[in-house]
Amino acid sequence: MLRLRTTSTVCRRASRNGDVMPEPPKFVIFAHNATYDKLHQVATIGMTAAAMGKYVIVVLLFWTIKKLAEGKIDQLDFPPEYAGSADEVARLLKDKKVPKISEMFQDAKQVGKFRLIACSAGLEYMGVDGQAVEQHVDEVMGLPAILKLTEVAETKLFI
């Protein structure tokens, strides 16, 4: 059985023989913007950090929650300023067999410690069905709990 110990800044766990091992550094991505280009960056950066041994926490906010609830997380949509290139980029992604966002999230869980968390206020504010989101995330948490969980993160990104 593993026991958790908390130091002033780092959570540590005790191994079976009692040695204290540091938790992997936390790498947090707050995902707000839900266009494909931004979600692709969330997924690839998160997967890479997990593969590098980081404890990755992706916090879904507003638009990412709505897109997930609507089943559109893998939709290829781009910001209006890139509309002229959207068809070409979509074709290249298909030709190069770039994985879907949802696949990259699952792959990240296979290569390392990767959690998807939805902010509970975002569920309410975006008017989405909580069950539609809960089945795709590891946990739904309130903002105070999210901030407590992520306060000692080595890296924090807002995308």
Image (spheres, rainbow, N blue to C red):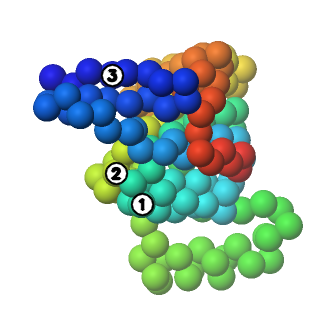
Q: Marks 3/2: CA distance? A: 19 Å
Determine if residue 90 is in view. Answer: yes
Which quadrant of the figure has residue 35?
bottom right
Q: Is residue 87 left or right of residue 27?
A: right
Sequence-wise, which precedes: disc 3 or disc 1?
A: 3
- Residue under pointer 2: 112
Which amino acid lies under the numbered mark 1 shown in the image of this protein?
A: Met
Q: Which residue is depicted at the point 71% across and 62% down?
A: 78
- Residue under pointer 3: 4
- Residue under pointer 1: 52
Q: Marks 3/1: CA distance? A: 23 Å
Q: Is residue 149 above or below residue 36?
A: above
Q: Which residue is depicted at the point 56% across and 82% down?
A: 92
Which amino acid lies under the numbered mark 3 shown in the image of this protein?
A: Leu
- Of residues 99 and 17, which is closer to you in this image? 17
The reply to whether the C-beta atoms of the residues labelled 2 and 1 are less than 8 Å apart is: yes
